[in-house]
Amino acid sequence: MKLSTSTNIIHMRPDGSMWPLPKTLELAAAAGWKRFDLNFYDWSLPGTPFLTDSWRSWIEEVAAAKERLNIEFGQCHAYFYNFLDQNMSSHEHQHQQMLVERSLECCAILGSKLCVTHPETDFFTTRMVTKSKAKNIEYFKRLLHFCEKYEMSLALENMCDFSIAPRRKYCANTEELVDLIDSFNDPRLGVCWDFEHAHIMRQNQRQALLDLGHRLTATHVSDTHSDTDHDLMHIMPYLGRIDWQEIMNTLREIGYAGDFSFEAHNYANTMPDALLPTAIRLSYEIGEYMMKL
């Protein structure tokens, strides 16, 4: 396993401003972090340079910071949208898909060969699983074809539908994820297991990881104090309720060799700037501790 952190470990500041990405990389690298996961969930918020015509100069600035700091990018998180939303106009679909492809190019520029994205749900049918599976296969076949130019693989994340019950989302359990991935029979498509999502969904984490086995190619690592309150989610391991010892034991048992990537964007977003070096150093030490479990 390779220890990694999402770039959202420092993103929003208490005043609502966004911390520049090169500055995040500098501070995190000084704290010990050497491997990063660029997350386009955050870098597609209104006001981000990714959404503007200057996106290429922005990502080239990030790439220059990468070289200067001697760091690397492993798994990243592509931009995503609900490509099964029938209420979205054709023009909006095209725009959203353009942003997906732009994010993949950005990740490729940084040297990433694996991007996480989301399966989506067809909420407009009474045959949710059957229809969602067919439409996800169609979409991701096209996206894998697009990724060929970058020699990039994809990992589909387990979903969480606790907050929309009794409605549910496709691929909120391992059975549907495994079935979808196996339908491709393509080594370029794997699973990203989000431990916090699984915890909220009352999944047996050990059994889920055993079921995924070789299909597991990426992880999202965070803890939580709530099933529904976003302000209490996505915090550092050991600050919430998850049993990490069993998870680490099982990851080693299945021979997982991908990124163990923190996705804790609520960890430091209310801390004053003066505390960030100490906070980010602690996050790195938590990661190092977990690597030794």
Image (cartoon, rainbow, N blue to C red):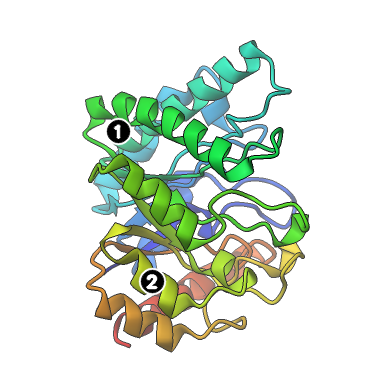
Q: Is residue 108 above or below residue 115?
A: above
Q: Which residue is mark 1?
A: 109
Task: Work out which quarter of the rendered image holds the N terminus and state it.
Answer: bottom left
The x and y percentages for residue 215 are 30, 58
**Residue 171 seen anywhere in this rendered image of the structure:** yes
Q: Estimate the x, y position of residue 15 in percent, counting from the top left.
A: 75, 52
Position of 56 compared to 16: left or right?
left
Viewer-nearest residue: 246 or 67:
246
Give neighbour class at mark 1: few <14, some 14-19, many 20+ (Cα, 10 Å).
some
Q: Residue 89: which disc?
A: none
Foreground label between 1 and 2: 2
Q: Which residue is depicted at the point 34% across and 80% down?
A: 250
Q: Residue at x 33, y 85 (%)?
A: 249
Alpha-carbon span between mark 1 and mark 2: 31 Å
The amino acid sitting under disc 1 is: Ile
Tag 1's secondary structure?
helix
Q: Amino acid at mark 2?
A: Leu
Element type at mark 2: helix
Mark drawn on residue 209:
2
Q: Are marks 1 and 2 in contact (CB under 8 Å)?
A: no
Percent x, y for residue 69? 28, 52
Q: Earlier in the sequence, mark 1 or mark 2?
A: 1
Q: Nearer the viewer, residue 77 or 18?
A: 77
Q: Classify residue 187 as left or right of residue 191.
A: left
Q: Residue 153, image x and y in percent?
A: 29, 41
- The quadrant of the image that shows the C terminus is bottom left
In the rendered image, the vertical position of residue 240 relative to residue 179, given as above or below: below
Give the residue at x 32% y 24%: 146
| Residue drawn at 55 percent across, 64 percent down | 264
Label 2: few (<14), some (14–19) or many (≥20) C-alpha neighbours in 10 Å: many
